Image (cartoon, coloured by chain):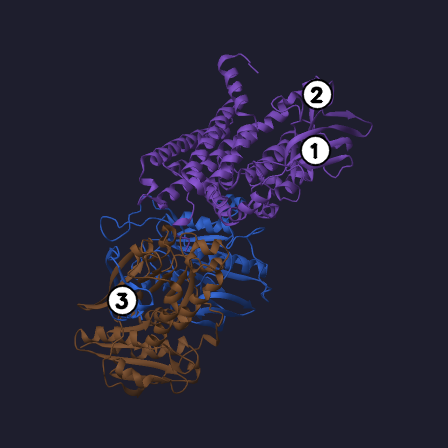
Chain colours: A brown, B purple, C blue
Amino acid sequence: MAAILAILEQRDGALRKGAAELMAAARQLADADGGTVDAIVFGSGNVGGIDGLGAMGADRVLTATHAECAHYCPDAMVATVASIAGNYRAILTAATATGKDLAPRIAARTGAPCGMDVIGVAMQGDAIRVTRPVYAGKVIQTLDLAGTPVIAVRPSAVAASSAGKAGAVETVTVPEFTKRLTVTGVSTADQGAVDVAEARVIVAGGRGLGDPKHFALIEELVAAFGGDAAVGASRAVVDAGWIGHGHQVGQTGKTVAPELYFAVGVSGAIQHLAGMRTAGTIVAINRDKDAPIFKVADYGIVGDLFEVMPVLTEAVKKART
Amino acid sequence: MAGSSEYTGVDFYDMDSLLSEEERAVRDTVRQWVSDALIPAIGPAYIDGRFPKELIPGMAELGLFGANLPEEYGCAGLNNVAYGLIMQELERGDSGIRSFASVQGALVMYPIHAFGNEEQKQYWLPRLASGEEIGCFGLTEPDFGSNPGGMITTARETADGWVLNGTKMWITNGSQATVAIIWAKTGDIDDTKSVRGFIVPTDTPGFSGKDQKGKLSLRASDTSELHMQDVHVPKDALLPDSGGMKSPLMCLTQARYGIAWGGIGAAMACFDEARRYAANRIMFDKPIAATQIQQERLAEMLTEITRSQLLALQLGRLKDKGTMTPQQVSLAKRANIDMACEVAREARRLLGANGILIEYHSMRHMVNLESVYTYEGTHDMHSLILGQEITGIAAY
Amino acid sequence: MLPRLPTSDSFTDEPYPALERETVKIAVCIRRVPDTTAKIAIGPSGATIDPAGVKFVLNPYDEFAVEAAIALKEAAGAGETVAVAFGDDSVQETLRTTLAMGIDRAMHLQGAPSTDGLANARVIAAALKDGGYDLILFGKLAVDDYAQQTGPMVAELLDLPCATAVTSLTIDGGSATVEREIEGGTENASCALPAVFTCDKGLNNPRLPSLKGIMAAKKKPLDVTPVTVGDAQSTLVGLALPPERPAGRIVGEGAAAVPALIEALTSEAKVL
């Protein structure tokens, strides 16, 4: 019976989003042989949201409290997780910047293999089998990780679901550790600084917008998605000076691999498609039913984007609350 | 990440396997510089008719000027194949920018190195390598292009130096240059043996350079008239080992060698653009790359480029061996530039209406290459040079 | 290479501010990877990519690390920079690229790397342990395997502080301050030296190897040390192409189609 440890991320005293997806991945592994999932949360005091972890699938919620853990403190987390790693079949983090910073450290400390940016996890005999994208997503790699592997899981790997477990809270001691890195603070970007190349959701605007000021429609939908969405643009509008080159998606812009890509008023020239073809799900909104973009899109709406976009933005806001 | 928009050249016959690691590294570094710094700037500069001189420090820092001259003078000390690859990659960007480097290296630094004394070399070469000094080569005159030996610019010896009088025309870098290598007759106006070279700082009183206007080709390059009215220069302005037309012609041989490689770069740029465009341009529900006529065009371009690459490479190996003749350079310059003109024109046609816009490169290359066809020995002059070589009969 | 901002007059940025130290010794761990423009095909064994026609280059993220090392040593005025690569003899050409950029000497750990990042990290850590380095730099990730673990593992094995994916790095005497991009913000951190950092885009604008640098590279020291890698706990099962995108569908026309779209995104695609 496998016990799986999921290391949750907190910021400013509350669980970060992505917790449900991480728990779902842990749950999927554990359920493969009737095992359990422990969620561990680090903080300097109470962490908001941990009472929801049972519903997300945690049998136990381990709280590790230490003054140094107000901000991300990898040294405390490595020491703590290493002290309990022997109890687990696998240790999971989210494949966020923080999760990917943490996972290899734990692996090195415990002498375990590490799998990063994993999109699929499964038991495979005594090993954990992971699939992950390599060569910029052009190839999918399958690895078998022995021992108690440390795995950073992408939020798209396993969808969140209700699992209704006990979520019994227990404290866990943070052992003696040497603090080598001090996180002094986090400044939140309010200039919409999510890089197009790393955004989970991209809303890209093209010539169909008609005028640079209509990028406001794009920005509103981006805002509806919260912090991990970015504004993208086709080469045509960048060349026309409607928006900066940093937003350009396509052959001479950035190659992106978001989970969700909206092509709004973008006709779908091959240069642009080359940049976004590895997106998880592509949605096209275009007035022209013969636009090439519809051949690549998973879902399309044929219509006037000026009518569709406001309605879509509202619907997304509603769906996300 | 860059994605497949990044330019990777054309190499159908694995030319890379014939290059050393250093040669490939040189080619790659210049290629990257051209992609990063030159390509973004060239369109507006070309439309404005302006040489993008803000690129000079970057070129100097990379070591592009006089790259095949020795390290002791602040140069990179590369072999001639590497030098050729530099010219190839610069011309992929623009013939005008490659012309700048050709002039600086082969027509200014080379004559100082070949015909100058040690003081001249020590003073001028490092400064030209660093871009601190910009040079130009004053040989051609309004009435003496293909027949430079007919020049009427004179240099009369004086008590403490020389006085120069005359006009030069079609001088690349002329208006920007801080120093000019002027070829002038020191003796009788018909005595070509009396031609000697002079290092003339362009701020010398009586010297003026003025851009020629109205160019439809090489617009991102300065092409100037030089006027010398009683320009007094000291004794040490003379390049002591220069003498006769052989001296400037040796310089031209250097420049022509680089130009033979340059044509390949321009052709590769046009082929690459045409190939991508053909793959993406949909007409009658399929890419135009699926049509026989465009495939024929592309096949022809690739064939010509491949032939030219092998030609230039062997020429470079001969130059490095020390056996290269001016006639061999004539063959390559003539062949490769003619090839490039064809490739650029065919690429322009493949691009259709879009091909007349500055955002596409082929037409700019096409019109530039008309100048390259004409300068450094016109195509026809090289035909006659080869004709003489073959038959023994001069038909000028 | 990663797309760079065009630089019109010089490819070097402003120099680093004074480091408040007179000398600095920096190791940069690099990898040789397929160029990102390469068409990737899986080889017949299904275990590796087909190298035919693939051009190999210095890992683009390692360029930021190399540039940082060279620039920091320039700012200090004295010290030494060492490029380290673990792999077969083909990495020597890539090491020479770093020498051409301005690294002082190179170390080739000659052997066959494992699919297990920890086994590789152990090899590298052993080679660097007694080097007296003030900084050990890596690129954030390698664009072939995206393993993203060697740097922090080496730090852990050497008991050194580590920050990953840094976009800003300032040295002040015996300590360092960094910034790293995290979701929705920037994290500021500091640590004492010696330390390990992995470098991300935005840290600097890597210089191109100059022509003189390319010629000088052959004369700089490149030491070869055979190494063996320990047992792997990570086994490659195989490589496969991602599944073909299935055909999509138009869910409807105009604003009326929005509910159907939301439904599809939520229940089918599960991205909402």
Residues flagged by tags 2 and 3 on a common chain: no
Tell me the distance, in whole angstroms, between the alpha carbons under discs 1 and 3: 70 Å
Tell me the distance, in whole angstroms, between the alpha carbons under discs 2 and 1: 21 Å
Label 2, residues with CA under 10 Å away: few <14, some 14-19, many ≥20? many
- The residue tagged 1 is B226
- The residue tagged 2 is B194
Circle 1 or circle 3, nearest the eye: 3
Q: Quadrant of the C terminus of chain A?
A: bottom left
Residues flagged by tags 1 and 3 on a common chain: no
**Which secondary structure, mark 2?**
helix
Residues flagged by tags 2 and 1 on a common chain: yes
Nearest to the observer: residue B46 or residue C38: B46
Question: Does label 2 or label 1 sit earlier along the sequence?
Answer: 2
Nearest to the observer: residue C268 or residue A129: C268
Residue found at the very far right of the displayed protein: B159
| Spot occupied by residue A159 in the image (x, y as percentages of width and height) | 26, 72
| Spot occupied by residue C154 in the image (x, y as percentages of width and height) | 39, 65
Question: Which amino acid, mark 2?
Answer: Ser
- The residue tagged 3 is C269
Left or right for A108, reference B186:
left
Q: Quadrant of residue A272?
A: bottom left
Instruction: Tell me, yes or no, whether the two marked residues, 1 and 3, touch with CB atoms within 8 Å.
Output: no
Nearest to the observer: residue A170 or residue C269: C269
**Chain hosting mark 1:** B
**Which secondary structure, mark 3?**
loop
The answer to whether residue A63 is seen in the rendering is: yes
**Which secondary structure, mark 1?**
strand
Label 1, residues with CA under 10 Å away: few <14, some 14-19, many ≥20? many
Circle 2 or circle 3, nearest the eye: 3
Question: Which amino acid, mark 3?
Answer: Ala
